[in-house]
Image (cartoon, rainbow, N blue to C red):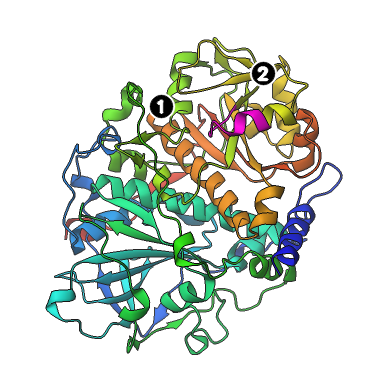
Amino acid sequence: MSNANAASVMAYHERSKHRLERYAAGPETLDWDAQPDPFRRYAGAATVTLPLPADGDKTTWRDIFSPGAMPPRPAALASLGLLFELSFALSAWKELGPDRWALRCTPSSGNLHPTEVYLVARGLADLDDGLYHYGPKEHILERRAAFRHLDAGTRSPRLLVGLSSIHWREAWKYGERAFRYCQLDIGHAAGALRYAAAVLGWRVRPVELEHAALAHLLGLDRDEDFGSAEREEPEALFELRHTATADIGLDPAGWMQGAAWSGHANTLDEKPMYRWPVIDQVALASRRPTLPLAARASAVTRELPAGEPARRLLPSTDVAAATLIRGRRSAQRFDRRARLEVQRFWPLLTALMPVYSEGQAAVPWDVCSAPAGVHALLFTHRIDGLDAGAYLLPRQPAALSALQATLPQHAWQRVAASPADVPLYALARNPALAGTLRTLSCHQAIGANAMFVVALLAEFRPRIEAAPWRYRELLREAGLIGQTLYLEAEAAGLRGTGIGCYFDDAVHELMGLDGSHWQVLYHFSVGLPMLDERITSAPPYSRERVSS
């Protein structure tokens, strides 16, 4: 079964590649007036209005990378309001002529937002036990299930956040490649959750449940609550660690025994024009199986070597974290005249390394349940002090020898000026890189005009053959790296944008990658943004709502 699933996953990945001679299968036309509703609601579910405290929060970007800089805040409704405001809430409304659209703290391919968010809460003094769906448009919780009463002695506060995907939201625009983008978005969402939790002084731990158990926990297996509405694919579950107490075990299935359910999902698209069966096929093939208890991973840890330098932050990182997170935007255009000094480049690369502190993976890498499997292939062409060309940053030391054996034709010269904890290797120089990046990025100027572009390279075939569900894991890791670059670029006074449209095999051929052992899963560009003054911005929520 595993071999058949692995073959199905790899066949999907090959089929969904963009190629120089053709793009992956997608819709032939788009009617933007008929775009699927970007907001899921559950009619009939009781709602809880969340507070909006971010305007008054003074935690700095620097603080969230400094263990112990602020004590963990209590598990209460006010904390949850801030958590969701800084992770999945709206960040602004934009207008251009007659068009109006919402932006969110979490980025999404095409601003389509296939990710839905759920909260499992138990033992909070000011929130009833139950399963809740988060509604970002109104910043509310919809109570999907009320848990049976628990004895006071067993009511220690526990919080879980679950993520799901509505594939049709992406497939409406992107066709067969949409499954990839949904997984990248889950990685971005996990990163957004982690950064928001860090503002509260909380940790985040991945909880690995097999597909059916997660679907049951999030209420996504309840046919009677969906009817003709688009179904959701359960994706990931995280525990919010708001205290330093020892593990006392999780029993979410036990909490749900005798739960009282309410709410019916809204239909997002009354008249879908296309169907993409291959998305359902790869989703089925890449679902997590039941794992023995001993094999369930938690956060990746290692000891901090003596004398390892602390993370170097950029000068602008004394800004309030809430301001930086809510100000994140995807760049639409870059100033091709702008350049970056190499000393300002190193902190951006440092942020990509899964560094550790006090035996725990640092923010945001502790949401990963496996060692780094995705590495940074960098194309730099507007960085003063660094030759234009291709470089490789192995994010896991053990991967270096495998990458060198795969690409023996390149120079592999260690960049002497790079910091000790940023093992950057020069592969090949290319002074005419801008035109190459435009071509590789589906002929988009956003690649040509950036200061640098990162192609995220994963060890692919061996991991998929061993565990087909790791396809999702690799794409999510790439999305998490993208989320890190988004926020680090903002902290540096720059801006980033994810590039899901690139010519897969053309990138491989450029670098000399043969076969499917290694595959590029995502592109990301960073540069100095050029703003469109025609687009106006409005606050995400009313003034009365924020001040209440």
Q: Residues within 10 Å of mark 2 (few under 14, many from 20)?
A: some
Which residue appears farthest toward the right when viewing the image? Answer: 21
Residue 294 pos. (x, y %): 45, 62
Q: Which residue is mark 1?
A: 492
Pick the residue in front: 34 or 341.
341
**Looking at the image, can residue 107 be seen?**
no
Q: Is residue 486 left or right of residue 277?
A: left
Residue 17 pos. (x, y %): 76, 50
**Residue 510, quarter of the rendered image:** top right
The answer to which of marks 1 and 2 sits earlier in the sequence is: 2
Between tags 1 and 2, which lies in front? Answer: 2
Pick the residue in front: 497 or 209.
209
Q: Which residue is mark 2?
A: 412
Q: Residue at x 53, y 54 (%)?
A: 185
Q: Residue at x 62, y 68 (%)?
A: 168
What quarter of the picture does the C terminus occupy? bottom left
Q: Helix, strand or loop at disc 1? A: loop
- Residue range of the region highlighted in magenta in the rendering: 393-402
**Distance from label 1 to label 2 (Cα)?**
28 Å
Residue type at numbered disc 1: Ala
Whether residue 398 is in magenta: the answer is yes
Would you place residue 159 above or below residue 500 in this image? below
What quarter of the picture does the N terminus occupy? bottom right
**Residue 447, quarter of the rendered image:** top right
